Amino acid sequence: MAGLFGGSALAPARRALLSWLPFVAAIPLLWVVQRTLAEQPDWEYAFQNINHIGIAIILAVSLNLVNGLTGQFSIGHAGFMAVGGYVSAVLLMRGPAQDPYRLFFIASIAAGAGAAALAGWLVGKPSLRLRGDYLAIVTLGFGEIIRVIIENTPLFGRAIGLSPIPRYADFTWIYTAAIATILVSKRLRDSTHGRAFLSVREDEVAAEAMGVDTTGYKVRAFVISAGMAGVAGALSGSFEGNLSPQSFTFVRSFEVVAMVVLGGMGSITGSTIAAAVLTLLPEYLRAVANLRMVIYSVALIVLMLVRPRGLFGTREAWELFPWRKRRGAPRAVELTEALIDVRHATIRFGGLTAVADFSLQVKPRELVALIGPNGAGKTTVFNLLTGVYPPTEGVILVAGRDTRGLSPHDIAHLGLARTFQNIRLFRELSAFDNVRLGCHHLTRESMGAAVRHGQLSLVEEEWVAKRSDELLSIMGLLHRRDEIAKNLPYGEQRRLEIARALATGPKALLLDEPAAGTNQKEKTELMQLIRGIRDRFGVAIVLIEHDMKLVMGVSERILVLDHGVTIAQGLPREIQTNPRVIEAYLGEKYAREHAGQIAAGQVQP
Amino acid sequence: MAELFQHIINGISVGAIYALIALGYTMVYGVLKLINFAHGDVFMVGAMVGWYVARWTGESQSPSIGGALLIALAAMLVCGTLGFVIERLAYRPLRNSPRLNSLITAIGVSFFLEYGGQYLFGPNPRLFSVLPRQAGLHVGPVSLGYVDVVTLVVSVALMIALQRIVYHTKIGTAMRAVSFNSNVAALMGVNIDLVISFTFVLGSVLAAVAGILYASKYPTVQPLMGLMPGLKAFVAAVLGGIGNVPGAMLGGLVLGLAEQIVSGYVSSTWRDAVAFGILILVLLVRPTGLLGRGEAEKV
């Protein structure tokens, strides 16, 4: 894939779209089945069951997010289903009589899902911060209240229910939604968010200690799950053609819980299969109609006693076949100590090769200088490292991660901060605000929290202010705190840029000619300061500098570029006596004429 | 004003029944940390046993105090046994598995009792009359039904008895010890299995009495009659502070009063929403309940 779209900014978007292709391709297939089978009279009864299974799958898989993955216990799923069903039915019954492209239908499903998600938020927000079984009780209560509200509201048809609802939902719609539900929950589970869900289930205290916002994740899982139940309700109403409050009792909620538990907590395939089994089971028990629910409940108790982890446990169906090769099996990894690891990076602008075959490893806390004459490609190297330009060839790893395809802000998140040769402060903002902006990616407050002055937002603001003052003070700029950045003297602007870069909490700091335009004394002081920053913050520093004498004292390793080519690399002593460096700096003619002195180490560039 | 008093009287009467059921929930939760969803159906079984015994002895035709006592004792005996059997067969094997499993089993047992009852008893409500028909008390315009008087007397007596058992007997001390920390209690020589069985029996016996009182008040019996009172009694237990015995009593009374006042002054159709509205409010404002103590989890 990378080869196909290599370097293109659209590559990630295309990759994401392509991954949904099988799903999109499945829709016409469902439609074909619908036309050839489902609409045949012989198959009517079978497809009625199949469609019921589809709706049950949506319910079970969505509840699995909360009960299975996140380990909470919701027993009010039917309530959210009712919210979605009724909202969408009310809209559909008042919508246009003709809906040839089903746009209004889709909108009504979305409205139902949104309403159910909102209800989920309202119920989940207060109850999910509590541990234990409270959620079970609250969701149970919620399911009952919803029913009471429906039975008392004329808009919802009171106890009689709503009818006729336009019957748009058919096999294709239901299974499109079911597959989408499965895909969404599988992808969520396989992501970092899914692991956060699991961590809440396993141990909330440990999860918090790992930085997982447990309440936040519980609420998220709950809201997503409620929204999906809303979709199931909307489809169910439109499939049956009517809705009545009796279909959303506690028994319905409990059936869904039973599906999740029977399938195995957290197993998506388990929920899917259990949804099918438990939907069909009552059909087969119809012969003993009176004893149906008795058998059902006994079967459930026995199952819990005999196989308490459900059919699949926490595994998926395919994991039951051990011979199937596991994807993502452990593979040998090359352990690298390097914080920044550039391997054979080349960048061409049209015909011009700005940097050729550049390799550089920077270890944590190392201080490396990048020197070279004007136009050697030093700043281009920085632009490559920070993702301003993608390399034409080669790989750049930052903190062990391949940065190809990452945008500059992603790379900043990885821990790379930089300053600019031609100062790029936020000119009209105060020095203080410039540094505070550096803290941006360290904060997590949402816009909502900022508006309502949430606890986190206040705590973070205080912390950002304190951190910014500290950095200003370290860089000797505290007295300039509230001055507009553009009014600062040149040297101070450069220091402010360093303070801003440090505010991002970097692992490596890239300084592009920090000493440019300052006098000799200031330069020497600045170099001391840079060393001090390294020691104090424990960051690695890559320093671009023009003046070779200056970097000799401060850097531990020097890399020399000329015309985009690395001509020398090594300890300061070695660089000083390297003939190619001298040639680059002092000219070919000079180097030839003073060859003897150079060899004796008497000439230094 | 008289109307208000009437609502208060009715509220206390219903509340006392809720409190009796809530005690069973709260004690089981205390020792097992399990919401025993089947408890409301044990309550139903109590009423149903009462109905069968009344028919068998002919008490339903000519109820007498002695007959009512006999019926109550029979119901208590059957429910006590039922509670013991449920715990032994359905909950004990799952004591060390995730709580979710016990909850599912509890709901399974609840369904079993409801639909089993429906199979044996038929789904239709039947008239229930085991208490002698007598006029109640009249204090001015406020009337106090005979059933209400009996309910109040019986529940207060039972609650005092329970209080004595829990706080002044050896087994009561053991119950509180298990509820506090079952592992430590076991190390101190408390027979955990015995205590848990006893708790179930005790709760079920109270539920049986509540079932008979409730069925006498409305005077009908039907297999799903345990569902709503069961849920509400659970809310009462949470309201009072789950695991807390006096809390369950208080919660039951508060809930009964709130319900009667809402159905008296707003609309009786909203009565069922009151309980769950209160529940959500409690969880928002004071999740440990009125008398519950907050417990910090040890890390």
Image (cartoon, rainbow, N blue to C red):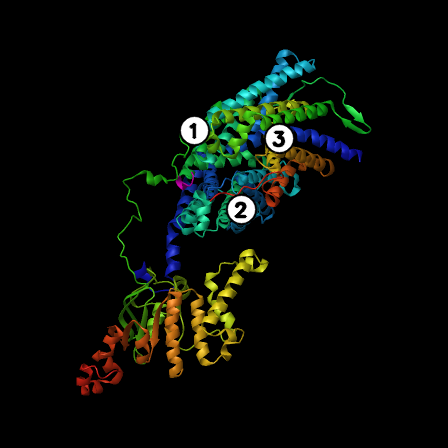
Task: Choose the circle earlier in sequence order: 2 or 1.
Answer: 2
Give the image quarter of residue A198.
top left
Number of numbered labels in the structure image: 3
Alpha carbon separation for disc pair 2 and 3: 27 Å
Give the image quarter of residue A510.
bottom left
Please say if the residues under marks 2 and 3 sit with CB atoms less than 8 Å apart. Answer: no
Q: Is residue A564 visible?
A: no
In the rendered structure, which amino acid carries the disc numbered 1? Leu
- Disc 1 is placed on an element classified as helix
Judging from the image, mark 2 belongs to the subunit labelled A
Q: Nearer the viewer, residue A369 or B298?
A: B298
Q: Residues within 10 Å of mark 3 (few under 14, many from 20)?
A: many
Q: Is residue B91 visible?
A: yes
Per the image, is A267 magenta?
yes
Q: Nearer the viewer, residue A148 or B187?
A: B187
Please say if the residues under marks 1 and 3 sit with CB atoms less than 8 Å apart. Answer: no
Per the image, is A436 magenta?
no
Residue that badge 3 annotates:
B229
In the rendered structure, which amino acid carries the disc numbered 2? Arg
Image height of B242 relative to A402, above or below = above
Segment colored magenta: A265-269
Quarter of the image that includes the C terminus of chain A: bottom left
Judging from the image, mark 1 belongs to the subunit labelled A
Residue that badge 1 annotates:
A305
Percent coordinates x, y for residue A334 in the rendering = 26, 57
Image height of A411 relative to B196, above or below = below
Do dots 1 and 3 share one subunit? no
